[in-house]
């Protein structure tokens, strides 16, 4: 089993990562990334513990890679995903646990990747096995950069196939974002947006190591360097970073190419296999864990301010608890109503899965708004830094503001700083934007929910009712 140290060692692979004007090759040592690397190393270490629920005893590999072909495997996978999210409180959106599910789904129907031009199905299965055996962290970048299609001067080039060689395909261009890419092992690249029949050059699907020559990651501003862990407890641990992804004629070996110029394969890979549904069970399990954490912080804040018996405040807390419970219930329903598809794979029930995904664009911002309302000015009524506690005079002044024998100043400040990292810091803002968009613009996500809802059943009910009385 891969340990945390193995994971950290593998990051020293000569990757090309830009951040704050620096070109960083040793990401594990850089302050922008060291925090999240330590967090993920701890998760890998947890998987090495005897009897860890992160491991599938049937394969001896991380259970996140298991293709659920039996009820037992389906349960195992869910338990592993819950454990994974619990270890990171749902703040790591694109850890190894997401793409592992996509790969498992792809490999469940290898023939989809075989066309007249390319027989890549076996390769898809081999890559899934390869990644699972090594416990690789594969992240994804599946959306093109934003650009104005009416601007004839635009030089934006979404990633495209430029050449096929005996060794593999050569790709060039850019993708919008790859969350976690700077600290992952590899990146899965394709188009989740349906392509037109003539967009063959954009019809690629592949995985490439982050260290591939010509692959450049341009990171957004890091939040991990915002301050001390006491001041930014979430930013410093869980900033998984997002990077723009640029391919400068990158060679991808055939062993990790899933599609090359085949529009039909690219357009059907997510839903013609169990990939999208298996992969996104992780998304809703993760959100449920995160909402539970937000609810816990809100409840502690209400207690800290002695308002836990106030009926109006209880109502606000109940609203937050309801948001969390609905997410949990939909996740439970998606899992327990899973059905085996024609390829023998348990797919989480689409009706519940996509209802949960569609809701999260609204429920996470709502949960954060509720937490902000409950916290009031308390998140601002905190000293600038943990270093303020070093000055006895300042400490005495703080006592006038927040002193209590029952609830020491440092404990109160610690709690409210945690709340600020959820409602007000850059990390907080990024998380709201993440939940709104990581799965696509809301219309896209709702389109999935629309597709999976059995409208015909509902219509039939109404039809029967209408037929039960005279015109
Ligand atoms: C924090 C963060 C992390 C991300 N990480 C990743 C990642 O790891 N990998 C990855 O591939 N992508 C990632 N993304 C990108 C994400 O996939 C896209 O943001 C998402 O697909 C939406 O695309 P867009 O940003 O181009 O927005 P647009 O598609 O431009 O949407 C913006 C707005 O345009 C309107 N709009 C768009 N489409 C429609 C429509 N069909 N009907 C009506 N109105 C519409 C809506 O108002 C929408 O809110 C990330 C995004 C964020 C914010």
Image (spheres, helix red, strand yellow):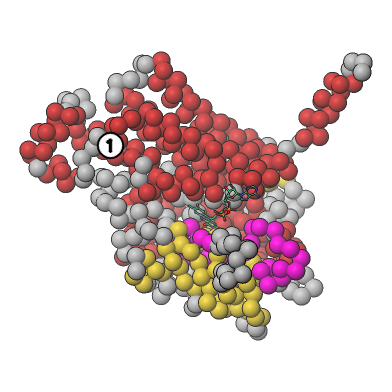
Q: 7 or 185: nearer the eye?
A: 185
Q: 78 or 56: nearer the eye?
A: 78
Q: Which quadrant of the view contains residue 252?
A: bottom right
Residue beneath the point at 65% across and 83% down: 165
Residue 198 covered by magenta stretch: yes
Q: Which residue is labeled 1 in the image? A: 380
Residue 131 placement (x, y as % from top left): 55, 64
Q: Residues within 10 Å of mark 1 (few under 14, many from 20)?
A: some
Residue 145 placement (x, y as % from top left): 55, 62
Residue beneath the point at 92% across and 18% down: 471
Q: 342 or 293: nearer the eye?
A: 293
Name the side, left or right, on which 310 lies relative to 65: left
Asked whether the viewer can see residue 71, the reply is no
* The furthest residue to the left: 393
Residue beneath the point at 60% across and 78% down: 170
Q: Is residue 419 above or below residue 218?
A: above
Name the side, left or right, on which 285 lies relative to 350: left
Residue beneath the point at 20% across and 40% down: 383
Q: Is residue 190 above or below residue 394?
A: below
Residue 422 placement (x, y as % from top left): 38, 41
* The furthest residue to the right: 470
Q: Secondary structure at mark 1?
A: loop
Residue 468 placement (x, y as % from top left): 89, 17
Residue 426 covered by magenta stretch: no
Q: Which quadrant of the view contains residue 142?
A: bottom right
Magenta-highlighted residues: 176-203
């Amino acid at each position: 089993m891969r340990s945390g140290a193995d994971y950290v060692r593998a990051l020293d692979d000569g990757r090309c990562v830009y951040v704050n004007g620096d070109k960083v090759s040793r990401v594990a040592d850089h302050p922008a990334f060291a925090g999240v690397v330590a967090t993920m190393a701890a998760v890998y270490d947890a998987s090495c513990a005897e009897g860890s629920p992160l491991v599938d005893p049937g394969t001896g590999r991380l259970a996140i890679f298991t293709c659920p072909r039996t009820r037992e495997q389906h349960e195992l996978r869910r338990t592993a995903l819950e454990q994974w999210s619990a270890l990171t409180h749902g703040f790591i959106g694109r850890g190894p646990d997401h793409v592992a599910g996509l790969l498992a789904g792809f490999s469940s129907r290898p023939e989809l990747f075989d066309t007249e031009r390319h027989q890549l199905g076996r390769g898809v299965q081999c890559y899934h096995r390869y990644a699972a055996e090594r416990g690789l962290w594969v992240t994804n970048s599946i959306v093109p950069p934003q650009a104005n299609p009416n601007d004839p001067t635009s030089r934006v080039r979404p990633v495209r196939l430029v050449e096929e060689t005996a060794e593999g395909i050569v790709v060039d261009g850019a993708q919008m974002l790859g969350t976690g890419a700077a600290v992952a092992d590899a990146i899965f690249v394709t188009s989740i947006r349906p392509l037109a029949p003539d967009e063959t050059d954009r019809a690629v699907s592949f995985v490439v190591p982050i260290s591939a020559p010509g692959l450049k990651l341009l990171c957004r501003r890091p939040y991990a360097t915002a301050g001390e862990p006491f001041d930014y407890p979430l930013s410093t641990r869980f900033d998984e970073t997002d990077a723009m992804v640029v391919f400068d004629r990158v060679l991808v070996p055939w062993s990790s190419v899933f599609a090359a110029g085949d529009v039909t394969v690219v357009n059907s890979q997510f839903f013609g296999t169990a990939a999208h549904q298996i992969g996104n069970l992780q998304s809703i399990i993760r959100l449920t864990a995160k909402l539970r954490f937000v609810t816990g912080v809100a409840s502690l804040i209400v207690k800290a301010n002695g308002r836990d018996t106030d009926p109006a405040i209880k109502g606000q807390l109940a609203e937050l608890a309801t948001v969390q419970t609905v997410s949990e219930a939909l996740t439970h329903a998606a899992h327990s109503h899973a059905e085996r598809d024609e390829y023998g794979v348990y797919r989480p029930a689409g009706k519940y899965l996509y209802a949960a995904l569609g809701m999260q664009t609204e429920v996470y911002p709502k949960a954060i708004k509720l937490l902000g309302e409950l916290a009031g000015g308390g998140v601002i009524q905190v000293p600038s830094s943990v270093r303020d506690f070093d000055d006895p005079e300042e400490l005495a002044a703080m006592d006038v503001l927040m002193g209590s024998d029952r609830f020491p100043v440092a404990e109160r400040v610690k709690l409210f700083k945690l709340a600020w990292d959820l409602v007000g810091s850059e990390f907080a803002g990024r998380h709201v934007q993440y939940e709104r968009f990581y799965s696509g613009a809301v219309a896209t996500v709702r389109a999935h929910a629309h597709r999976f809802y059995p409208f015909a059943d509902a219509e039939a009910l109404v039809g029967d009712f209408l037929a039960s009385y005279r015109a």
